[in-house]
Image: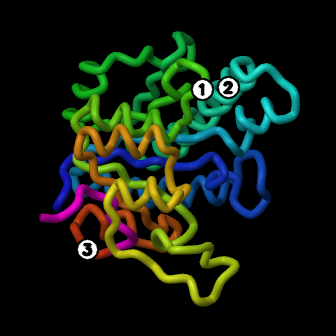
Amino acid sequence: MKYKRVLIKLSGEALAGDQGFGIDGEMLSTISKEIGQLHATGTEIAIVVGGGNIHRGVAGATAGMDRSTSDYMGMMATVINCLALQDTLERQGVYTRVQSAIDMQEVAEPYIRRKAMRHLEKKRVVIFAAGTGSPYFTTDTTAALRANEINAEVIMKATKVDGIYDKDPMKHNDAVKFDTLNYIDVLNRGIKVMDSTAISLCMDNDMDIVVFNMFETGNIKKVVEGNAVGTLVTKPQK
């Protein structure tokens, strides 16, 4: 395996499947099976899940809600998704721990960096809930922050397309896929694969990002094996 410790970033929308909202049990099962297969290789896995299938903070603020309140609601939505993912993984025999940035002892451990790393060493999947615990930060930024804190080797950004394109491949047949990009290219082109705060944090700490289609069977394992899957965002090559 090319990577021994990875952080997977899942969007909340991915859990919704084709229904567009809530949690699709079949989609959740599919994602969990892919993660379970990767776990069986001995790879240490951390996961950050978004909450957009239930509530998106920015959307709530756009509708007139106080931004901080809306973001806290989004954090609660991520906890729901994390618990659903935990349940599905454990029914497949994969031991997990949910760690929350907001204290809620009845449902999740508090986020403690050293404890998270110890869980990973014991081959438990660690699922980070409630974002950073502060408003105005997305779960993309949470993924970049936690990946650096736990010394992950790569962020695996799971999407519905097989990488980064120069324009939306769902709308344009002539869209061109990038095999590799550097952080500055992503920022300058305004590519919305992750928000600028997350990209900048990865750039400052040389944290690679692989953007790939998780919903193609076996892709997640191929990325960790080092196969050319998706698009690699990394520092400029000399």
Q: Nearer the viewer, mark 1 or mark 2?
A: 1
What range of the chain is rendered magenta?
229-238
Label 1 residue SS: loop
In front of the other: 50 or 188: 188
**What residue is pinned by disc 3?**
227
Q: Is residue 215 above or below residue 151?
A: below
Identify the main secondary structure in magenta.
loop
Q: Is residue 231 magenta?
A: yes
User: Would residue 216 be seen by someone viewing this image from the given angle?
Assistant: yes
Crowd around label 1: few <14 · some 14–19 · many ≥20 (10 Å) = some
Please tell me which residue is depicted at 28% across the width and 29% down the height of the picture: 149
Give the amino acid at mark 3.
Answer: Asn
Left-right relation of 161 to 96: right
Q: Earlier in the sequence, mark 1 or mark 2?
A: 2
Q: Quadrant of the N terminus?
A: bottom left
Callout 1 touching callout 2 (CB < 8 Å): yes
Query: Mark number for residue 71?
Result: 2
**What residue is pinned by disc 1?**
136
Q: Is residue 127 above or below residue 193?
A: above
Q: CA distance from mark 2 to mark 3?
A: 37 Å
Q: CA distance from mark 1 to mark 2?
A: 7 Å
In front of the other: 80 or 141: 141
Residue 93's quadrant in the figure?
top left
